[in-house]
Image: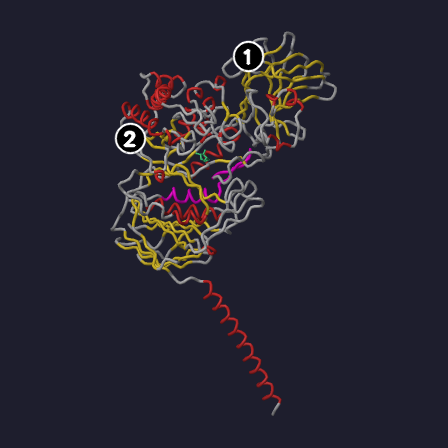
Amino acid sequence: MSNETAFQNRSTRRLLRVLAVAIAVVTLLCQIRMATAADPVKLTTRADQPGPKISPIFYGLMTEEINYAYDGGLYAELIRNRMFQDKPRRGNRAGTVSNPAVEKNPNLIDWWLVVDQGADCAIDIDTNEPVNTIALKNSLRLEIKSVAAGQRAGVANDGYWGIPVRPNTQYTASFFARASEGFKGPLKVAIEPNKGGAAFASGEVPTLTSAWKKYTIQIRTGDVQPTADARFVISASNPGTVWLSFVSLFPPTYKNRPNGMRVDIMEKLAGMNPSFLRFPGGNYLEGSNFENRFDWKKTLGPIEARPGHMSPWGYRSTDGVGLLEFLEWCEDLNMEPVVGIYDGLHLDRGKTTITGDALKPFVQEAVEEIEYITGDTSTTWGARRAKDGHPAPFKLRYVEIGNEDWLNNGMRDYAGRFAMFYDAIKAKYPDIQVISSLRSKDHYDHTRRPDLLDDHFYVNIPTALQNAHYYDHYDRKETRIFAGEWATNSPRGGPVGHMAFALGDAAWLTGLERNADVVNMHCYAPLFCNVNPGGMQWSINLIGYDAVTSFGSPAYFVQAMFSNNRGDVVLPATFDPLPMLDAEQIPKAPARPGAPRRESPATNAKYDGLFASVTRNTPSGDVILKLVNVQADPQPLDIDVQGVPMVAPTASGQLLTADLAAMNSVAEPTKVSPKSFTITNAGTRFRHELPGHSVTVIRLKTR
Ligand code: AHR
């Protein structure tokens, strides 16, 4: 064999070996692909066979004072314990720092003595000569016995886990003050870094008098970095005694409302495009006892005359968010109020439930509450609303009698209590829809037929997936449903849920939309959570925040995607074949350290792998596909849109997909968030692939 021939043979063998390896690699890759890619599933929808109409107020919000929802949350007030009424509570400064002032008097919680070395100063609570006896019985006495030139003495408030400092921002500080004869001002107010150094913003009140007077000062930050590592300080550099009451500090508020709401959180809510607000609770409506129910009359008028009360969630509420503020919140976000009416039940197992004749004054108060909301200024309570600053009446179509009266032995006497409220409300306001706080599954014998029943669902992921069919077989002749609290939230854990929970929510929401002839409206709960240590009483909430930053959970984004893409009529939609999953194949909530694992689906249960709600927005003609893939693998879909003349090739959409354990936080507020996309292959028949563990919304143009 010539050298040349031997060389050619060697080259051929090498080539063959390379080819063989390449074929093996390609075959392996194909096998892997075949093992993971699901077979295409056909999704058929028929736009010419519209089903139930969807209520225009289908998507809304539920709110109450829990998890520092208003105080330390949405309500923009920055001073904590502004009325010197609070007592030590779980979570104050994470329980790590002891405050000598508080050891002296518990009502000094959140207030700290500030003394330069050498100055002699003391603080205490004083009940003599209060500003008013309704709400401001306590004042803070600051006694500066001696202070050398250039020194200061005063008090600091560290707010709700810090005073939020934002650049180039104007803050409104206000307080009542009086001083001992001979005290020479000024009083200096400042937002200061906790670690010391130059103030972020400061101002002063030049002189005080011996009589109480309210002082209001604007202070402004410069070009500073946002931080919550700051406190609010009131100090003086002259000896004497100063009394302070109702110390308040507000940053700019949403729509610049006085006594208003925090801008970033309101913007988050606006992003959900909600149609109604269910308030004031929740357990916050009922209260732990009669004294601490939501007593709406005590929440009206000047904030310094609102006594506040204990929320059932373990801390005092200022009632800065009172009935009118709830209504203005609705107005600002174009939401309808759904007002919870106190009905005599408290969170005490029925020990103090008010019934019969004793309930009559509260039935009358409910009618007055509706007059406050809806009456014109010729009515007693409409005139009161005008005096409180809002002459125009609000629209009110829904009230709910009580909250969760299936608990606390409420069912024992609910029929009677419900009938009293129902009769009185319908007699004066026949168009108002009266919601029962009992659930459809209670099958309760109301003596008056409620307009809606309030079903609540706090569930784990397997149940959320199954509950997507909860109303499929609901008797259409039965009372319609307001799903007034729901969340995929088990096993419980942190302040907000992971992507896995959001998949459960999305599947459930497709079921609510498909059953829009049963479900009139619905809202997730709870809405808010301050994520600082001690801020949370209820885990898994929709929106989290600290003093500076707020963020939506993955569940928040699911709701925003759904609510911002609403149809007005349900279209039939079927998967063929519908992939079915075993219990071990469905999304699992990640284990949380220390949390009990309560998620134990029956091993033989089967779960849908895909969920859909298809609706049409009649004015635009858009067909809206909401698609949830709870399978780990991508799912190719052959989408067949029947009964439309055409579907434009270009369609817009949003996709939410992430690891099941992924979640958002103050540090990573949008780690899990929807991405917008455009497809150009849409048509009456087209293929679209849903990523594993994903929620997709696609809007198809049919004109
Ligand atoms: O959303 C938290 C609580 O759950 C509500 O206050 C109550 O209505 C329900 O039990």
Kindly identify the amino acid type of the residue bearing the numbered disc 2.
Answer: Arg
Q: Quadrant of residue 352?
A: top left
Which colour assignment does the render follow? secondary structure
Q: Earlier in the sequence, mark 2 or mark 1?
A: 1
Q: Amino acid at mark 1?
A: Pro
Label 1 CB less than 8 angstroms from ligand 1: no
Q: In this orientation, does residue 232 appear?
A: no
Q: Is residue 571 visible?
A: yes
Query: Quick check: 559 above or below 604?
Result: above
Q: Is residue 431 left or right of residue 198?
A: left
- Name which residue lies at 61% across and 30% down: 230
Looking at the picture, tell me which residue is in the foreground, 623 or 109. Answer: 109
Nearer the camera: disc 2 or disc 1: 2
Residue 432, label in figure:
none
Residue assigned mark 1: 130
Find numbered disc 1 in the image and state the secondary structure of the residue it sits on: loop
- Dot 1: few (<14), some (14–19), or many (≥20) neighbours within 10 Å? some
The residue carrying mark 2 is 448
Q: Which residues are magenta?
A: 542-565
Give the left or right position of residue 348, taking residue 381 as reference. right
What residue appears at the point 68 percent right and 13 percent down from the top-left corner? Answer: 239
Q: Look at the image and say whether residue 560 sits in the magenta stretch.
A: yes
Q: Ligand 1 is found in which quarter of the picture?
A: top left
Front residue of 556 and 260: 556
